[in-house]
Amino acid sequence: MKLKLATVALGAAMAAGPVMADLVFPSLSYRTGPYAAGGIPFADGYADYFTLLNERDGGIGGVPIKVIECETGYNTEKGVECYESTKGEGSLVYQPLSTGITYQLIPKTTADGIPMHTMGYGRTSAKNGDVFSHTFNYPANYWDGASGAVNYLLEENGGDLSGKKIALVYHNSAYGKEPIRTLEELSAKHGFELAALPVDHPGQEQKSQWLQIRRDRPDYVLMWGWGVMNQVAVQEAANIRFPMENFIGIWWSGSENDVLPAGEAANGYKALTFHNVGTDFPVFDDLQKHVIDAGKAAGAGDQVGTALYNRGLYAAMLAAEAAKTAQEIHGTAEITPAMMRDGMEALEMTEAKMTELGLPNFGPTFSVSCDNHGGDALVGVTQWDAANKAWTLISEFKPTDGDVIGGLIGEDSAAYASENNIDSRCN
Amino acid sequence: MFYREAGDFKTSYIDDSQTFPIKFDRYRYYVVLAVAFGIIPFLINDYLANALLLPFLIYAIAAIGLNILVGYCGQVSLGTGGFMAVGAYACYKLMTAFPDVSMFIHVLLAGGITAIVGVLFGLPSLRIKGFYLAVATLAAQFFLVWLFNRVPWFYNYSASGQINAPERDVFGIIITGPNAPAWATYLFCLIFLSLCALIARNLTRGTTGRTWMAIRDMDIAAEIIGVNPLKAKLTAFAVSSFFVGIAGALFFAVYLGAVEVGEVFGIQKSFLVLFMIIIGGLGSIFGSFAGAAFLVLLPVVLKVVGADWLGWPTDIVAHLQLVIVGGLIILFLILEPHGLAQLWRVAKEKLRLWPFPH
């Protein structure tokens, strides 16, 4: 009994005492549940990059990194539990990888003074840093994705989409509904016809939606899907012989898991992206040497180089760079969440910096400011090659329609600011 | 020895029919109340509140509500998630429409609206029962979730279809939103739970509760002795939905703060609350508490032990958790079909005789 009590006391002491020696990066991952296929590679990439920094450079600015992993299962209640249990450990930045959890954490992180980075997901209007002081969504958001897809189609069609029909197949949740408003604006601007087809969680049943597509024959299909919904959609598109090169998914619908089950039929499927694909970057040699060969890879270690692994790696890299920026600004290696927020707000990603990190042209160049927490909104397009089982970047990172998106962001963030009595802080 | 009724004489009928007739039980109940109201608010922190206590209190309210319908009145319902969603969305609409009104009133009104919706969906129970009624309430679950996803008026036309709880207070103390102190949210939910439990206890041991139980045990016999099945079934649906609606409103406004109906109030929620009352004990108020505590605390305890102390990979712990919770449910159903409440009753019987069982 005494031993038990001692263990409990020790555990409590360890949990309570702030560990100032490490830079803590919590990883709210999901390796279980219906969305695990997407959660595992992201979590692996996120953890592996920090392991690499620890092994190769001894951390960031000489301070070792500690990654605390907490399983959310893509479930908001577990997400809250994870947030509450890790926030006391000096967590520097949260990346929940779930739009539902993001909505919950936006007010909580702001109240607790901890920054949150929702890279390519979450609440789009968080780009307006004037209102959302602790939420960042650089380098691109859903509305950039919607506009990027339309811009790409404009390019394909010589700048004219009038009279074309575009269908949107979306996950019937906060995540899937995000692009609709932008696409409606864009359809008015460019004169294409938009049809929105919701798919309910988890998305295994899509027969009726694809029957409708088969009947209406849209010229293009866009998809906002996640998890098992993606592979079912690609399979259904193949079943109705929809031309794959006219089928474009958002970046969350563009991983190997989504296209491999359909095999040869998925060839030519396209997906948007805000980072590069493949392992043809110098940093992967270091990863192989310091992390994978040393047996320190996260998870099963079989995800290296997949689209979502690269995204996790990219997210970790941006977090590490923001931490470095914070260390420079405040002149101390042991930064706090408040300093981390300043670092994120002053983050600047240049080609030279990415080359130096061993990731040349891995993502778009962008800079963050007090007003702009969303970066410069550059979006690229990748295409699946079923024969080689690889994604290739077919369109470089290009700007999106800032006029339309800027207006919508202003409107939505103003509504949030008035609901929550937030004053302007940037000027 | 400590726990006995010898020498504990009652001199009036009121004394004799009180909830805790044994002195030791009564004092234990006062101690629990004193700790819950007087001590925990001073020790509480964000983690304890948001990870353990708030979900426990809120699920306990929902479990009491469902227990009235399923445990006391015998009407199987799979629509709990949908009715919780009604409470949540009613609370949201009220909060945004009348920002100056106290949260207390909003939550009560949300419960009232849910009661009306519950009665509407309870109407089929007058014609069908058993599995068929379960399917009818399942339809309510899917219809309500679809409705809140489909009609933008319910989520105030927000782009994402999410609802977010704005900051609201009771007598100047912030109850909802990120700046609400842990003790305030805890006490707010605790007050509702205490009131609900008191009401439920007194309803179930009075005339209303007896008519419910008569309907549950044999509806034809009950009708012959003069119980009005229409009134009994619809009051059960109304009271049950009232509690479930309060739970939904608190779940959204106080606990989560932001809700997406399909994810939070889906069919899993209906099953979770149903499991709580089955494990806790059908037809028992204490069982509702025990079941809620069991299913809220167990995953957290397993996570703390597995991932934080033993340092196992998080995915293995998450999978083990499913295995252990599933195994325990089966074990309980085989060894003690009447749930944790029955275990508690047996333990009390044993204690009363201890240390001289013969």
Image: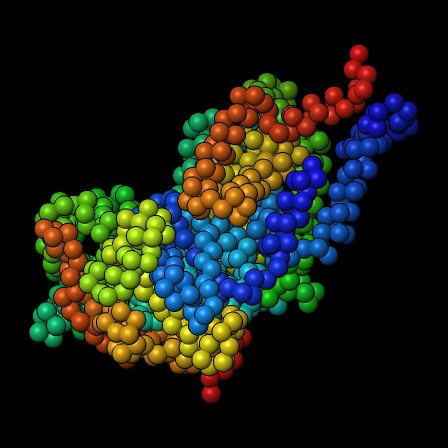
Q: Position of residue B152 (x, y in %)?
A: 39, 60
Quarter residue B232 falls in: top right
Q: Position of residue B61 (x, y in %)?
A: 61, 43
- Residue plotted at (52% across, 43% down): B310
- Residue plotted at (61% across, 49% down): A11
The relative height of residue B75 versus residue B157 in the rendered view (above or below) is: above
Q: Nearer the viewer, residue B209 or A359?
A: A359
Q: Nearer the viewer, residue B358 or A295?
A: A295
Q: Position of residue A125 (x, y in %)?
A: 39, 71
Colour mapping:
rainbow
The relative height of residue A54 versus residue A405 in the rendered view (above or below) is: above
Q: Position of residue A161 (x, y in %)?
A: 13, 70
Does the rendering let one see residue B263? no
Q: Nearer the viewer, residue B323 or B17?
A: B323
- Residue plotted at (30% across, 52% down): A293
Q: Viewed as shown, does residue B127 lie left or right of B220?
A: left
Does the rendering let one see residue B281? yes
Please identify the quadrant where the N terminus of chain A is shown.
Answer: top right
The relative height of residue A113 versus residue A262 in the rendered view (above or below) is: below
- Residue plotted at (78% across, 37% down): B28
